[in-house]
Image (cartoon, rainbow, N blue to C red):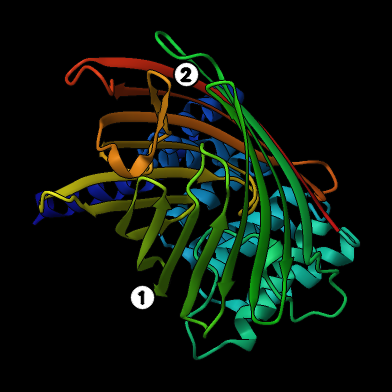
Amino acid sequence: MKKCIQCVLFFAIILWITPSLGQNLDYTGNPDRSFLTARELAFNGKRDQARDTLNQILVKYPDYVDVRGLLASTLSWDGRYEEARKQFNRITSRERHNKEVWIAAIKNEMYGEEYYLALGLANKALLNLTNDRDLLELRGLALKNIHGKGNKPRFKNVVDSVNVLNHGDTEIKSYKNKIGIESSFEIFDAFYDPMFYTSLEYSRETGIGLVLPRINYSNRFNTNGLQYEIDFYPKFSKSFYGYLNYGYSNATTYPNHRAGIELFANLTKSLEVSLGMRYLEFDAGNATIFTGSISLYKGNYYFSLRPYVTPKTQGNLSLAGDLIARKYFKDGENYVGIRGGMGYSPELRQLKDGDMILAETVLFLESERLRFEYQFTGQSNLNLYRVNIGVNRQELVFATGNFFWAFSAGISYQMKF
């Protein structure tokens, strides 16, 4: 009996001193260095390890805003929206002018489809950061989803581009017009002289959809050419919208007529599919191209796969495909992306054999292409810029199985009004 009492006393003492020992094992590292390590872990997908480090830092430095903000963001990325909310609330209750944290907190509620909470946070943030445009846009998105409750939300974990939204808040100024210009060039490692391209475009958001008339200019094979084109994106419902295109040119370097039609459907809050076709008509012939797409929004990332199927005159098919991957930043107009493609396609650049310009419709050449692009807005969000650089490996017209390289670069500018 005496030994049992001694054992009980021994374990009681151990249980009593263990918390004290734990309290003495305070964090002793460099918080800034540890934060950078945790951030790298988080961005590399090792969020559990990152949170362990962040929690250790917060034991000793509970008011380290960047640490707690990153902790909240990792919870939000993993769909733990309520836990993230608690962490964001601890920051915003003290740091009332930290715009980055307010935006992250509002987005957390949007991701969790808590649109009323998102609206409340946006209003609270605007009391401290009056008339901030990014916060106004988020508030408009929250209202948009609240008004559309019961239908598919338009928010896909990436803030949609504000120029295609009809905000429900009358205090938000909506810019329905854009005018833009784009220029690019292409150089080759053999046979072909440099080629130059320019387009001038105007877009208008109407009650039935987006309308984009465009004039395209090119100088290829020392030949100038103009093409007149218009795109229309009709809106049918919350879940369906379309694409219509028509283009005309009497230049030898463009198709005489081109047309396109496609229907897009939002299946879930993160998945979109489409099905359509393109038609090209040249003096030398024509081509009908069947296409479609499947697109996925995952957090601040966007992926889209688009195949092209073109029947040949011999009865077989030409197959090609493009893949797009983007990472968005503060909204749908700011992103970095990569676009790759391969296969046989009649929509490649026209080439020349001797003195004859060959139409795309008679060319089914093998190619691989890769392009990087970066798009960003100016400080006022009224100006939009995009730069791109790419490389293309394509089969020679007059030497099947032999390839040339083409390098391209371009820049575009758009202004809202």
- Judged left or right of residue 391, residue 129 is right
Q: What residue is shown at x 69% (from left), y 80% (from top)?
A: 143
Q: Residue furthest top?
A: 190
Where residue 11 sits: x, y (%)? Answer: 24, 48
The residue wearing badge 1 is: 267
Q: What residue is shown at x 64% (from left), y 50% (from top)?
A: 333
Q: What residue is shown at x 83% (from left), y 52% (from top)?
A: 97
Q: Residue furthest bottom?
A: 150
Where residue 384 sits: x, y (%)? Answer: 74, 44
Given the image, on which type of amino acid does mark 2 rest?
Answer: Phe
Q: Residue furthest right?
A: 130
Query: Helix, strand, or loop for circle 2?
Result: strand
The residue wearing badge 2 is: 407
* Residue 103 in view, yes or no: yes
Report the quarter where the C terminus lies.
Answer: bottom right
- Judged left or right of residue 219, residue 50 is left
- Judged left or right of residue 258, residue 388 is right
Given the image, on which type of amino acid does mark 1 rest?
Answer: Leu
Pointer 1 or 2: first along the chain: 1
* Residue 25 in view, yes or no: no
- Judged left or right of residue 365, residue 349 is right
